[in-house]
Image: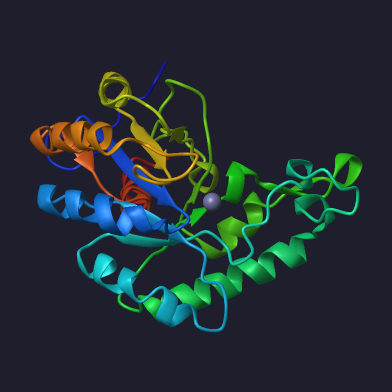
Amino acid sequence: MIPKLTPCWPGERLAAVSLTFDDGAPSQLARAVPMLNDADLQASFYLNPRGDDYLETLAPWRAVAKAGHEIGNHTIGHTCSRAFRLEPTARGLENMTLDDIEKDIVEAKRRLQQLVPEQREMSFCYPCYLEHVGCGPTRQSYVPVVARHHIAGRGKGEFPFPNPPATVDLHYTWSWPAERMPGSQMVGLVEACVAKRAWGILTFHGVNEGGLSVAERDLRELVQYLQINHPRIWTAPVAKVARRILDWRKDNGI
Ligand SMILES: [Zn+2]
């Protein structure tokens, strides 16, 4: 039997939704941020603070943080599986140790905190949704590394399952990749969260840009739906929802 728990979400809300944007694509600044600001909704943007001039390169994101959005850690190296490459000498997560990945994560977080010192908590986003280093018998999860340094981590899950607040692993939350997805399908996923009183996370890359693009009009359909439904569906950045869940678990003895 499921024990009686208090409702998790603020006010009368029935579900939570986080919109997450990876890699700092220029179309996010040009299209997604103004659209979200107009709707007074806040999202999470996962950046890679690369190069010596990272503070200059990422300077436009300071205003994004000031508008209430979360700036999140997407590592410096954005290392994925070497199986994305063809040459036998390719480098990737399989050639890395937990120490290697921890060094990258810690330095990336330090740089991003320098960029947005006013932000209190920061979540992490797994490059290519992958959470391992090593290969075969030496393969290990780096979720515990993320858990040491971040309030939450965003990974990838299955359609149409959202994250139940009582049972989600906050350091590998499930998200739905939303590239090429019609607005009506995204709205359907949001309503699946309401049905389960759970937390849905959508992952975006470019907006009308790049190979993993969402169409601006589809994103707008979702954002307008979330704006109108804000009294019943809580749209908030990943770090904020994770903090809410931790407080709620404490109150409910979970
Ligand atoms: Zn990425």
Between residue 100 and residue 90, name the one nearer to us: 90
Q: What is the x, y in percent for residue 200?
A: 36, 33
**Residue 176 visible in this rendered orientation of the protein:** yes
Residue at the spot 16% in from the left edge and 55% down from the top edge = 37
Q: Can you say which quadrant of the picture contains the N terminus?
A: top left
Q: What is the x, y in percent for residue 110?
A: 51, 77
Q: What is the x, y in percent for residue 81?
A: 73, 46
**Picture quadrant of residue 77:** bottom right
**Residue 119 visible in this rendered orientation of the protein:** no
Q: Can you say which quadrant of the picture contains the C terminus?
A: top left
Between residue 82 and residue 246, name the one nearer to us: 82
Residue at the spot 20% in from the left edge and 38% down from the top edge = 223
Residue at the spot 27% in from the left edge and 57% down from the top edge = 30
Between residue 164 and residue 75, name the one nearer to us: 75
Q: What is the x, y in percent for residue 42?
A: 23, 52
**Picture quadrant of residue 225:** top left
**Picture quadrant of residue 187:** top left
Residue 190 vertical position relative to residue 35 in the rendered view, above or below: above
Q: Is residue 22 left or right of residue 77?
A: left
Q: Is residue 91 left or right of residue 168?
A: right
What is the image's colouring?
A: rainbow
Count of labels in the image? 0
